[in-house]
Image (cartoon, grey):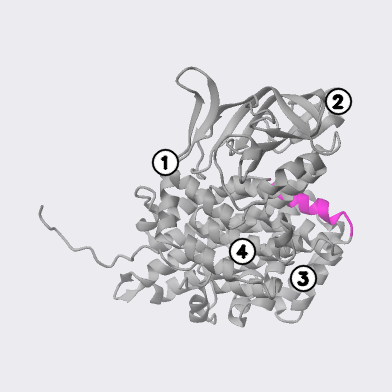
Amino acid sequence: MAVTHEVFNQPTPLVDVNLFEGNRGLQDALKFNAPGLDTAPLVHLGQRVGSAEMQRHARLANVHTPELRTHDRFGHRIDEVEFHPSYHALMTTACEAGLHGTPYAEDEQASGHAQVKRAASFMLFTEVEPSVLCPISMTYAVTPSLRDNPAIYRDWAPQLTSRAYDPALRIWRDKPGVTMGMGMTEKQGGSDVRANTSRAEHDGRDDWGERYRLTGHKWFFSAPMCDAFLMLAYVEGLGEAGLSCFFMPRVLPDGTRNGLRIQRLKDKLGNKANASSEVEFDGSLAWLVGEPGRGVPQILAMGTMTRLDCALGTSGLMRQALSQALHHTAGRKAFGRLLIEQPLMKNVLADLALESEAATALALRVARAFDRQADEHERLLARVLTPIAKFWICKRGAAMAQEAMECLGGNGYVEEGGEGVLARIYREMPVNSIWEGAGNIMALDLLRALRKGDVAAALAQELAPAKGQHAALDRLVETLPARMDGGTGEIDARMLTRDVALAVQAALLAQSAPPAVFGAFCESRLKQPHDVFGTLGGGTDFDAIIRRAMPY
């Protein structure tokens, strides 16, 4: 074969780097939110997920997507989803890192930083592959909710909090570890779960409490190969007040399979390695969790935790998008200079770095509040900052991924058998903004939070340490009390959510980031709306910000 040219001026893949050791923004946020935290497990995980081997697993799990098998060759209904071995390798690593129910184990909680440690680990893992974290995140969210049925929690907690992964569809007591999912939304309602039509008929009582038979469907039912699910259905005879929460295992206590029918798998924009499905159930057995009619408060509690994961996951994706842009521009020349040395590219890269570090700071602050729920101030902050973080970080993530892709030019747009990391990130970004309540739901949730307790006072206390450190931040903070004290209607809810998010991010950066990062963030985000990346002022210390952000 003729040799037509030599390939040169192409960066190498960003592999075999320690994603934790190269992330100075994450390290400083951890020092601020969890002083004294043992970071050795994060160093280990950072090396693991930054390896070429894990990148290969991520690629293969997304190229060879899940396949539904409704029947075996003899015609028996089996309702199983088959995954590529790389999916199971990724799930094994996620469980070993304790990203699912492990933070609720007693030995983890004793540290006082279980949620922050898990949050940092979740962000690191997201950088390599976010799709498999759907069942991981749901397991994390439902584990504490199972305490409302002590008998089920007693039986299932050891496996939910273990670090073992077992994909086999068999009875829970024979497995070293289990995962759980949720079934909430239906065709006619979406986020309006009170519009659900699935019903629950009482079927007796046993060791797990009140037993029911569920009939109905779920429109978005992610990770159908989980071992059990928390479901919403109306208890017959209670009318509109009967929407309740139920525990539905795939395999029943007698070892037989429950009657959960997977109709089809969703064909999604991104999130390809994860199986999302539509299901129906006809007399499927389930057990009541909590009191009848308390379904909505229970799913809101679970939703708060999965919303945190949406913010954490997007923050991780933003960091990896930034790392890919930095690595590419540091290894490719144009017009006689490396791209990273070009003044305008410096502006873009520094701007992306500010966005990534601010997202990390806010997401970890929410996780810290989850660690300290016995403290009233922290409890209020968890309530108000969770929708704010999900709204703002997830909105900014999609725009940032597009800009990072542009730094790579055509190389960023090409997937080439799944090797294009930025293309995969770009397709993944919208999902965290949509799942667990889209932007309007989050903004309205902020308004609801502000009507309860001393939430506004808690926010003011959180912003106080940064007072006097930047004039633009002081001006923004001065506008917030009147707007939070009933001065904002639904029509302006998104504006308020954005502004509170920016104020909190700036206040956090004032306490955990170098002056170059804090000052540039305030100058570019608080004086006027930040509508496009690469518009930092000429006085910005671009080199210092870029040096801090480099992934190695």
Left-right relation of 64 to 468: left
Sequence-first disc among 2 and 1? 1
Q: Residue at x 76, y 40 (%)?
A: 152
Q: Which residue is mark 3?
A: 477
Q: Amino acid at mark 4?
A: Ala
Q: Nearer the viewer, mark 2 or mark 1?
A: 1
Q: CA distance from mark 2 to mark 1?
A: 45 Å
Disc 3, disc 1: CB below 8 Å? no
Q: Residue at x 41, y 50 (%)?
A: 59
Q: Is residue 130 visible?
A: no
Q: Which residue is mark 2?
A: 239
How far apart are labels 2 and 4 at the CA level? Answer: 43 Å
Magenta residue span:
437-453
Above or below residue 160? Residue 341 is below
**Residue 217 shown in magenta:** no
- Given the current orientation, which residue lies at the most extreme front position? 174
How would you rate the neighbour count of disc 2 (Cα within 10 Å): few for under 14, some for 14-19, many for 20 or more? Answer: few
Is 439 in the magenta? yes
> CA separation, marks 3 and 1?
49 Å
Residue at (29, 76) in percent of width and height: 336
Q: What amino acid is labelled 1 in the image?
A: His
Comparing labels 3 and 2, the label whose residue is closer to the camera: 2
